Amino acid sequence: MLRGVELRGVRIPHNKATAELATVRMPVPTQVIMPMNQHVGAPCEVQVKRRAHVDVGTLLGHTDARMSADIFSPVSGTVREIRSIHYSNGRSTQAVVIESDGEQTIDNNIAPPEVTDYASLVEAVRHSGIVGLGGAGFPTWLKMDSDLSTIDCWLVNGAECEPYLSSDYREMVEHPDTILHGIRTCLDFSGVPRARICIENNKPRAIELLREMSAGDDRIEVFELPARYPQGASRVILRNVTGRSVPRGGHLTDVGALLFNVTTMSEIGRFLQDGMPLVRRRITVMGDAIETPQNLEVCIGTPVKEILEFCGLKSQPRKVVIGGPMMGITQVEFDAPIVRANSGLLAFTNELVDRPQTTACIRCSACIDNCPMRLAPIDIQKAYMRRDVEKLDELMADLCVECGTCSYVCPAKQPLAQSTRFARAFLRAKQREAKGRR
Ligand code: SF4
Ligand code: SF4
C-alpha cells in the first residue's frame, strides 16, 4: 500500500476561458492522417489498400493483439498513401493518409450494436475504436473485460484538473444524456452496484446538471471534489473518492474499482445508440498565440497545422503542446495529426515559454510536500543521475504519475518531473531485465 497519508496536490490557475463556449464543429479537412498506434498496445495492421475508396466508419486498422483498439475512417474519400510518420517523441508508425471527397458518406456496415448481456457489451465496445479519451489511450473494451466479481464502484472521471482544458467539461454540459446512458448500460449488464461521477467543485454547472438528470437512480452519485491538481490522476481520484490505495504494481481493479474518463463513458453511450465508431473528438485549442480560443470537434487525424489555421494565430507560436500544459507533449512537427487520446492543443508565444534559469536546490521540500504520490522527486533525481537502481526502487520512482507538480512548485526550477519520468522508465526497464534473467 502507499504510505497511508493523504494524497496531495496544488492549486494552480485554471485558465479555462473556453469553458462556457459551445463546441464548434470544424469543417472536414482536405486530408486526414490516421496513425496505426493510437492506443497503448501493439499497432494495428492496415486493412485498406492505396487508391481504395473509404466511407465514414470504414475499418482502416485492426490487429488481434489484446492491448489494441480498431481504427476507423473519419472521412469519406480515397486512400492516397500508406506511409511511415514520425512523432515528436522520436517514435514512428504506419499511417493511412486519406484525401476527403467532402461527401461524408457513411459505411454500409454502420448500425447500432446488439447488446444482450455483458459479454456482448464488451464485444461491441471492442469494435468501437474507443480508448481512454482523457489521454491514456488504453483500449476501453480491455478495461471492461476485467474480473468484475469484486468491483463495487464504477468511477467516472470528470475532474479535468489540467489548466486550459475544458473538453470534458463541455461533454458534461452538452451531452449529459449520453454519459448517463453509457453509465446505466454498463451498470445494468455488469452487475456493478453503483457509479460515481467525480467532478471538481469549480464546475458547478456540470455537477448540477448531472445531479438533476440522474435524480431517481440511486445507483448513480455525483461526487464533488476539491479543485486541486492532479485530482484527475487515477490513483489520486481513487484515494480521494473511495479512501482506497492501489498496492504497488497493482491496478484499480485490485481494490474494487474501475475508472473511466467521462468523455469515454459518453462515447460508449453514443456508440450504443448510433453504432458509429470513434472518428471525431473534441479538443480545447488555447494559448496566448491563438486568435480564437475554442473547443473544437475535429475529425481524428486532422493535422495540427490545419487546426491552428482554423483558429487563427495572433503571432508565430514558440511552443505548441498536444494535451495540457502540465502533462502534454511539445510538438516540433505541425503536420502531425490529432489522435484519439488528445484532448487539447495549446500554442504559446515567448512570454509564456521562457523559463527562469535553474538554480541549486535550496532544500525547501516543496517538491516532496506537494507530490500527490508522496514521492521525493529531488532524491529520485539524484539517484537517477547515479543510475542507482536499488535507491530508485527504494524511493518507488515507478509510482510517479508524471503530473509535473514537482517542477511547477520548485523555486529553483529544477526539471524534476522530467528526471522522474526518465527515472521511472529506467527503473522499469531494469526491473524487466531482472525478471527476464530469473
Ligand atoms: S511528476 Fe511524479 S514525482 Fe513529480 S509530483 Fe508528480 S507524481 Fe510526484
Ligand atoms: S522544490 Fe526544488 S528547491 Fe525545494 S527541495 Fe525540491 S528540488 Fe529542492
Image (cartoon, helix red, strand yellow):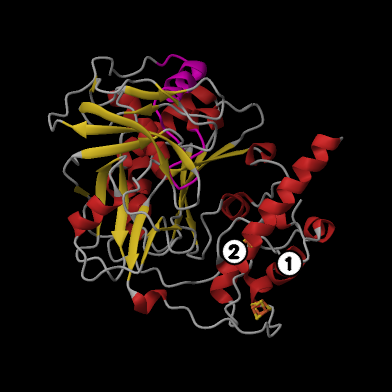
Residue under the point 32% across and 20% down: 49
Q: Residues within 10 Å of mark 2 (few under 14, many from 20)?
A: some
Which-is-in-front pick, marks 1 and 2?
A: 1
Helix, strand or loop for the magenta stretch, by majority: loop
Which residue position is annotated with label 2?
418
Q: Which residues are magenta?
A: 115-139
User: Is residue 348 part of the magenta span, yes or no?
Assistant: no
SS at badge 1: helix
Q: Amino acid at mark 1?
A: Met
**Residue 25 quadrant:** top left
| Residue 31 appearing in the image | yes
Where is residue 196 shown, x and y percent of the image?
Answer: 50, 44
Where is residue 295 shown, x and y percent of the image?
Answer: 26, 54
SS at badge 2: helix
Query: 285 or 232, which lies in front?
Result: 285
Q: Is residue 105 left or right of residue 218?
A: left
**Quadrant of the image for the C terminus?**
top right
Query: 363 or 76, which lies in front?
Result: 76
| Residue 248 appearing in the image | no
| The disc label shown at residue 123, or none | none
Q: Residues within 10 Å of mark 1 (few under 14, many from 20)?
A: few
Which residue position is annotated with label 1?
385
User: Is residue 121 part of the magenta span, yes or no?
Assistant: yes
Query: Reading the chain from its start, which is encountered first: label 1 or label 2?
Result: 1
Q: Amino acid at mark 2?
A: Gln
Where is residue 398 shown, x and y percent of the image?
Answer: 70, 53
Residue under the point 18% across and 40% down: 30
Query: 95 or 64, which lies in front?
Result: 95
Q: Is residue 378 left or right of residue 331?
A: right
In the image, residue 208 above or below residue 301: below
Q: Quadrant of ligand 2?
A: bottom right
